[in-house]
Amino acid sequence: MRDLIKGRAGAAVVAAAILLAVFSGGAAAAYAITSADIVDETIQKRDVGPSAVGTSEVANGSLGLVDLSADAKSKLTEGVTYVDHVLTATSEEFTFKPAPCPTGTQVVTGFILSGGTNASYNLGTDYVDPAQNAWMVNMGTSNPGEGTLPVRVVCLG
């Protein structure tokens, strides 16, 4: 090794190596890309390394379904069951009618479907009743006689 660094050529190689080591950090920093160099909306998936963007870099509410992979989208509905019911009322007097979830699942919410006959409901008074594992709908008939109201319940499990 000593024979290699003897003489002018060896000294030049050692000097170049030292200069490279000393100045390479500053040279890299001088050519770093900053956000001012990037045009908005131009960074793509292929430009970002794996795990380079994490939870701390993503603002709440900023991602939509279009931003998720097919696998992530399928996990959103994993374990979700939708159960359709047709609730019946026989009086113009409003009462709460249960739309239950199957045993082994848990009611989350529900919503009114289109259709039905001679039925009215009080919007905003519905609630989840854990004791009955049901979505409760406050409904009655629009006129004397029987009324029907189609609903869909969202259940987990």
Image: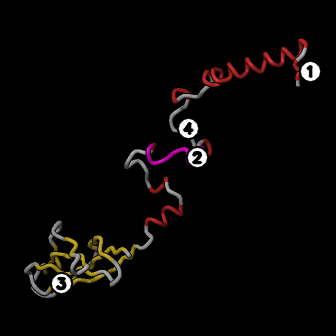
Q: Residues within 10 Å of mark 3 (few under 14, many from 20)?
A: many
Three-letter code, disc 1: Asp
* Residue ID for mark 2: 45
Quadrant where the N terminus lies? top right
Q: Residues within 10 Å of mark 2 (few under 14, many from 20)?
A: few
Q: Which of pointers 3 and 4 indicates the residue nearer the eye?
A: 4
Three-letter code, disc 2: Lys
**If you read the primary sequence from the N terminus, does the residue marked by circle 3 or circle 1 appear first?**
1
**Residue range corresponding to the magenta coloring:** 49-56
Residue 122 seen in render: yes
Query: Which mark is drawn over residue 3?
Result: 1
How far apart, in angstroms, are the residues tagged by discs 3 and 4?
A: 56 Å
Residue 52 falls in which quadrant of the image? top right
Three-letter code, disc 4: Thr
Name the secondary structure under disc 1.
Answer: helix
How far apart, in angstroms, are the residues tagged by discs 4 and 1?
A: 53 Å
> Is 62 on the left-hand or right-hand side of 140?
right
**If you read the primary sequence from the N terminus, does the residue marked by circle 2 or circle 1 appear first?**
1
- Closer to us: 78 or 95: 78
Three-letter code, disc 3: Gly
